[in-house]
Amino acid sequence: MLLIVLLALPGCGDLSNVLGNPQDRAKKGLADSKVGAFEIGPASNWAEPKLYMDYAKSHGIALKSEHGMLVALLLIGPKTGAEVRYDRLAGLFRDSQSGETFTTDGVKWGGDDDRPSLARCRIRHLGPLDDPDVGLIVDPGKLFRQEDQQWSKAASNHLFVEAKD
């Protein structure tokens, strides 16, 4: 009965307005934990191609370095707002609530085609971009979504440069 009343109210036809959008819940969970922007040191610390879990427990962020680029993945399930953990045996991230999986690049793996990938966090620079040792800041306050074609934006990653002789 309550649902019928809510649907009859103006603006309540979209259940995400009533029940809450998982993306908004994820951001709220992030805000509640008071995880703000944080420094991760010089870019050269992250140049080796691999998955870095240094900030997974403390900040809910994984860093992935590959193909000359560093990205910061938000470890919050895009549909559930639940914690996402790395499954070392499978080599995949797994949503702790739904069991949905994602590659180490944050791309959805298996399941429905319409489900979102993990969000990337903004990476800010503390100095010139062409400095191989430029300081980096990860900012979970600004997220980039693959489904919105935002992963190609410059702030969603750090591109490594060769050291100048």
Image (cartoon, rainbow, N blue to C red):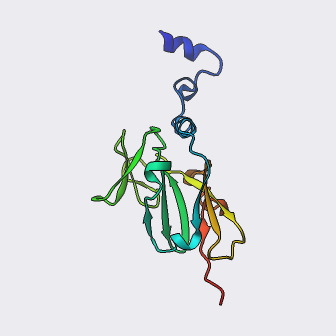
Give coordinates of residue 84: x percent, y percent. 41, 47
Task: Name the quarter where the C terminus is drawn.
Answer: bottom right
Q: Which residue lies furthest to the right in this view?
A: 128
Give coordinates of residue 2: x percent, y percent. 50, 11
Q: In this view, does 8 lie above or below 50?
A: above
Left of 92 or right of it: where is 128?
right
Q: Which residue lies furthest to the bottom in this view?
A: 165
Q: In this view, does 150 lie above or below 15?
A: below
**Residue at (61%, 67%) from the top-left corner?**
158
Q: How many marks are shown on the rendered structure?
A: 0
Q: Is residue 131 above or below residue 126?
A: below
Occupied quadrant, residue 109: bottom left
Give coordinates of residue 152: x percent, y percent. 62, 62
Q: Nearer the viewer, residue 52 or 89?
A: 52
Q: Which of 7 and 117 is in front in this view?
A: 117
Q: Residue furthest top?
A: 1
**Residue at (69%, 64%) from the top-left corner?**
126
**Residue at (48%, 64%) from the top-left corner?**
64
Give coordinates of residue 15: x percent, y percent. 53, 26
